[in-house]
Amino acid sequence: MVRRKANKSLVKRVPARSACHARGQVWVAILLAFAYPSAAAPPTRSEAIRVTLLGTGTPTPESDRAGPATVVVAGDKVLMFDAGRGTVVRLVEAGFRLSDVDALFITHLHSDHVVGLPDLLLSGRLPADYGMRRRPLTLIGPTGTARMARGLEQAFSRDVEMRSAGQQLDPEWASFAAVDFPNGGVVFDAGGVRVTAIDVEHGAEIKPNFAYRVDYEGRSVVISGDTTFDKRLIAAARGVDLLIHEVVSIPALYLEKFPGMRRVLAKHTSPEQAGHVFKEAKPRLAVYYHLALIGGTSTDDVVSETRRVYSGPLLVGQDLMTFEIGETISIHDRLGPPRD
């Protein structure tokens, strides 16, 4: 069922296991002492998890698709996954304060997934209407995450010194509480919310490389990060409520003309491969994000190729699209409705 609300959002309701169709591990428990209220109202028990796609783009600068970033609100926790270009702007546009983020999880250390980190770190500790974080920013990711965090702190140390002195701000508020994980497993367990990292393939030189699964109150979400077709992701995502997956689409003629692009495709998932992932995992709803449309391909092409093997619930994600997951899945599109 689709209902349009004037000047507001498109709302779809996806019942459990419906056949709707549209285009387009424990290593450590991080206990958070304070729960900061979110400008976006927390979900009710019947809508246990709320997911917002902040950015659905790639390294390519696009005005309508910010870099990859996703927010998951579960109970009183606001969790963010990756921080690509434009993350801070999209976070505020989605109705959050920058201080709302309880923990940020990194899939891997490619620049397009982390370039928004210093903006969130530094802007989030300033006194402003969009929130003032009075604690270090919790950062969780694969091996190398803590080293990157130290480098960013050093790079902006003079800014922190000047603003701390001039505005009487605690410099600790402009620091990371960073944790590295060399393997997959449970990386966060607090407030009834569990986050599990799944090691997936994204090239021999990119290890570890994580997808993430969030579980709360019997509801579940998997975010693929960058990955090839990987059985480990399918196993982790089987039967989840929401599976958010990357996709790279490159026409055959373009690959013939630019054979080097095959190296790109080999580290990602094609639409048809993603279709096989969805077919085997059987999520209540499959959603594309981190869309790399190369060589003139379109979202229509992506859906068409996916439909060769998968006929279940599918959407092409857009920036600021929000999913409320309960007995039904409600989809609110903040930047305009998805194509029919």
Image (spheres, grey):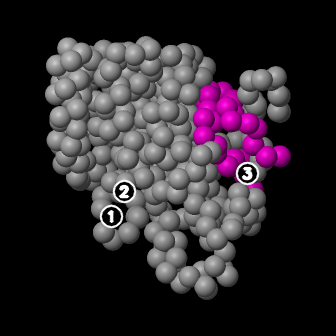
The amino acid type found where label 2 is placed reads: His
Residue closest to the eye, 263 or 325: 263
* 2 or 3: mark nearer the eye: 2
- On the image, the x and y values in percent for residue 159 come to 22, 32
Is residue 298 at least partly visible in the picture? yes
Pointer 3 with pointer 1, Cβ within 8 A: no
Please give the residue where the numbered disc 1 appears in the rendered image. Answer: 206
Residue underneath mark 3: 24
Mark 2 crowd level (few <14, some 14–19, many ≥20, 10 Å Cα): few
Residue 75's spot in the image, x, y percent? 46, 20
- Depth check, mark 1 against mark 2: the one in front is 2
Query: Which residue shows up at 40% across the image and 16% down it?
Result: 128
User: Image height check: is 199 above or below 164?
Assistant: below
In magenta stretch: residue 331: yes
Answer with the quarter of the image where residue 202 lies: bottom left
The residue where tag 2 is placed is 110
Q: Amino acid at mark 3?
A: Gly
Q: Earlier in the sequence, mark 1 or mark 2?
A: 2
Quadrant location of the N terminus in the rendered image: top right
Does the residue at mark 1 contact the one at mark 2 (Cβ under 8 Å)? Answer: yes
User: Measured from the top left, where is residue 239 in percent x and y?
Assistant: 57, 45
Q: What amino acid is at disc 1?
A: Ile
Measured from the top left, where is residue 323 in percent x and y? 62, 33
- Give the left or right position of residue 281, taking residue 126 as reference: right
User: How far separated are the C-alphas under marks 3 and 1?
Assistant: 30 Å
